[in-house]
Image (cartoon, rainbow, N blue to C red):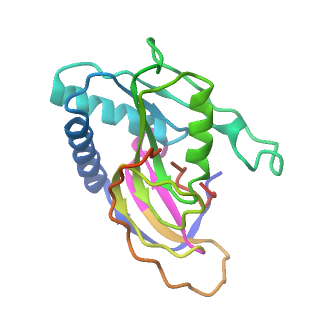
């Protein structure tokens, strides 16, 4: 559910988002030495359109189609028992599956890391990739699990009281990233942690642009 933010400020505009995605596409191609064996899976909701945009950019660079789909993690979340009432999203695995492929998980915001842990568990039920990597548009810090992204559009230092909202043309009419506090939140500000380095090397893998624990 979308939340209104007080004191909101835009930290990325549409041009910034486009440039970040273009850079990430080139990084993915460079690391993979091409587009061979790549499969992009977006985590609903906003990870899915981001995955399709990345696939288009990689295809434009390499001249070959990149399989892209969606991976719903709802039933794999570790808070399902505490919050059982939630809508399922669509899982769409491209033809050819994920076995022995380089799977790139795509999401909009990396926060606690719990959504990515759920995504890795969901992926185990689908197949056995050769490797799994993570792309996120925003890394806001505050990890609760040892998970980091392989490719990051922007590291944005935040306090726990702040919310990062990603807006995309496909769902919101325009692109941008906004930082603020949920309306009515009167908690005292916290000092923001420093930004990470934005590049990983482990088995990385994301969050929706709301104040969810991800």
Rendered-image quadrant of the C terminus = bottom right
Query: Where 169 falls versus 95 (above or below)?
Result: below
Q: Please check the rendered image and state whether residue 51 is part of the magenta-colored stretch, yes or no.
A: no
Judged left or right of residue 50, residue 89 is right
Judged left or right of residue 2, residue 9 is left
Judged left or right of residue 17, residue 78 is right
Residue at x 52% of width, y 54% of height: 209
Judged left or right of residue 151, residue 159 is right
Looking at the picture, how far across and down is residue 99, in whole percent?
47, 19
Considering every residue shown, the one lying at the far top of the view is 95
Residue at x 32% of width, y 64% of height: 197
Looking at the picture, how far across and down is residue 100, in whole percent?
42, 21
Query: Where 182 falls versus 190 (above or below)?
Result: above
Looking at the picture, how far across and down is residue 128, in whole percent?
51, 24
10 or 213: nearer the eye? 213
Query: Where 147 falls versus 163 (above or below)?
Result: above
- Quarter of image, res 212: bottom right
Residue at x 77% of width, y 45% of height: 80
Span highlighted in magenta in the image: 161-177
- Quarter of image, res 51: top left
Q: Please check the rendered image and state whether residue 165 is part of the magenta-colored stretch, yes or no.
A: yes
Query: Where 46 falls versus 34 (above or below)?
Result: below
Residue at x 37% of width, y 21% of height: 67
């Amino acid at each position: 559910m979308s939340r209104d933010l007080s004191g909101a400020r835009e930290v990325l505009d549409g041009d910034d988002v486009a440039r970040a995605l273009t850079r990430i596409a080139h990084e993915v191609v460079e690391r993979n030495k091409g587009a061979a064996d790549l499969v992009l899976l977006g985590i609903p909701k906003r990870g899915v359109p981001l995955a399709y945009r990345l696939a288009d950019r990689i295809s434009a660079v390499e001249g070959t189609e990149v399989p892209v789909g969606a991976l719903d993690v709802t039933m794999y979340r570790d808070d399902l028992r505490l919050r059982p009432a939630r809508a399922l999203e669509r899982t769409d695995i491209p033809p050819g599956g994920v076995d022995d492929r380089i799977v790139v998980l795509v999401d909009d915001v990396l926060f606690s890391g719990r959504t990515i842990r759920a995504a890795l568990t969901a992926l185990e039920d689908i197949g056995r990739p050769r490797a799994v990597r993570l792309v996120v548009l925003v890394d806001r810090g505050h990890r609760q699990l040892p998970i980091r992204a392989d490719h990051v559009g922007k590291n944005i230092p935040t306090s726990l009281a702040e919310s990062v909202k990603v807006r995309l043309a496909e769902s919101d009419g325009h692109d941008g990233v906004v930082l603020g506090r949920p309306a009515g939140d009167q908690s005292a500000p916290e000092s923001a942690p420093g930004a990470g380095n934005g590049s990983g090397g482990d088995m990385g893998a994301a969050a929706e642009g709301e104040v969810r624990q991800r």
